[in-house]
Image (tube, grey):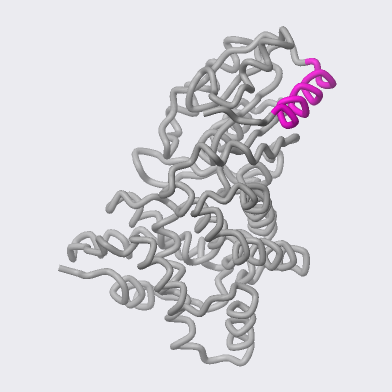
């Protein structure tokens, strides 16, 4: 596949030329990325070393191996090209190395918004163990939307739904501000207009979908995610769902549960606003997920259900607009998972 991305590669080169790094740590899923950014580093004659040895759901131990490479090679700049995992690894390397190194990110999916957030999602033997710091937000980004052509249909589905979920959760959050809600609303407008076109590989959708992801990232950077993310992680681990599928399922049925159990005028207004700005009701969003074949394997054993419930960190849901206890969490899981 040929990417017509000279404009973005030239932006990348200009940024590096200004910064004049001595040695770059190149964090990506492969040493020579298909998009031409490692080649661009070589063309500029900057020294570089690749770090690619990490999982799709990065383990802390892998990040620490990256820290060792960063220090051993005496790198003074980080370039990361890839989706949320690669960008989060780069951010975590900066965090654990306790360095003030600059990061230049080139996102290649329209989903996580990791290039603009203070979070790095990591795992410790499969259990979520993230880090957060405003210091790890990448300093520079190149939004090369041509890279989206590389994504398979399923990847487009689940990464796009992650951006949608970020937008909704940030809008709901008790930590939301006027600024974060503006980002959420703008992201949802783009999602409504371009998501279907994106799934049909209409290239006119690439740039707006990448912008949707960025705006959703900016929203959660202020307001953080809420209950859907907190409830998704064990489903992701136990069922092998992608992050985007797990969080979208939790969002759909948490949304319905909130609507059915709403007891305050304030929450009623918030949920009404959600339907207006998202273009969905909980039911129509559930239909979307079914039409995207994300509801084909919704089965848990009783033991798995117990693990899901106990694995939810209630404190991480403290900014959710409706307070849930463990009975609520069980009821929500049972509303969409078949327990056997």
What is the quadrant of residue 226 in the picture?
bottom right
Reply yes or no: does residue 9 show up in magenta: yes
Reply yes or no: does residue 52 show up in magenta: no
Q: Which quarter of the figure is the C terminus placed in? A: bottom left
Q: Main secondary structure of the magenta part?
A: helix
Residue drawn 42% across the image and 81% down it: 257
In this orientation, which residue lies closer to the viewer: 118 or 240? 240
* Residue 234 rendering spot, x and y as whole percentages: 35, 55
- Tell me if 171 is positioned left or right of 125 in this view: right
When the figure is inspected, residue 27 is found, relative to residue 223, above or below; the finding is above
What is the quadrant of residue 283 in the picture?
bottom left
- Tell me if 195 is positioned left or right of 250 in this view: right
Which residue is at the far right? Answer: 18
* Residue 325 rendering spot, x and y as whole percentages: 41, 75
Residue drawn 52% across the image and 20% down it: 51
In this orientation, which residue lies closer to the viewer: 160 or 55? 160
| Residues rendered magenta in the picture | 6-20
């Amino acid at each position: 596949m040929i990417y017509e991305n000279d404009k973005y590669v030239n932006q990348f080169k200009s940024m590096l030329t200004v910064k004049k790094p001595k040695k770059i740590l190149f964090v990506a899923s492969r040493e020579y990325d298909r998009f031409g950014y490692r080649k661009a580093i070589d063309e500029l004659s900057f020294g570089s070393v690749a770090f690619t040895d990490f999982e799709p759901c990065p383990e802390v131990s892998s990040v620490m191996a990256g820290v060792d490479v960063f220090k051993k090679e005496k790198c003074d700049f980080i370039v990361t090209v890839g989706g949320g995992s690669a960008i989060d690894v780069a951010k975590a390397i900066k965090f654990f190395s306790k360095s003030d190194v600059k990061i230049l990110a080139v996102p290649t999916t329209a989903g996580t918004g990791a290039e603009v957030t203070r979070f790095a999602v990591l795992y410790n033997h499969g259990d979520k163990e993230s880090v957060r710091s405003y210091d790890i937000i990448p300093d520079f980004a190149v939004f090369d939307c041509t890279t989206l052509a590389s994504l398979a249909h399923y990847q487009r589905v689940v990464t796009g739904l992650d951006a949608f979920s970020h937008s909704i959760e940030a809008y709901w959050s008790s930590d939301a501000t006027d600024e974060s809600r503006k980002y959420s609303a703008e992201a949802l407008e783009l999602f409504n207009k371009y998501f279907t076109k994106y799934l049909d590989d209409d290239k006119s959708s690439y740039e707006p979908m990448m912008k949707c992801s960025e705006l959703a990232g900016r929203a959660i950077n202020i307001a953080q995610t809420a209950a859907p993310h907190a409830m998704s992680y064990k489903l992701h681990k136990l069922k092998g769902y992608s992050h985007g599928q797990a969080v979208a399922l939790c969002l759909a049925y948490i949304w319905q549960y909130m609507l059915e159990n709403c007891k305050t005028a304030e929450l009623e207004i918030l949920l009404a606003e959600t339907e207006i700005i998202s273009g969905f009701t909980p039911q129509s969003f559930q239909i979307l997920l079914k039409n995207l074949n994300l509801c084909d394997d919704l089965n848990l054993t009783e033991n798995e259900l117990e693990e899901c419930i106990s694995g939810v960190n209630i404190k991480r849901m403290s900014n959710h607009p409706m307070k849930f206890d463990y009975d609520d969490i069980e009821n929500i899981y049972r509303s969409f998972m078949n327990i056997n």
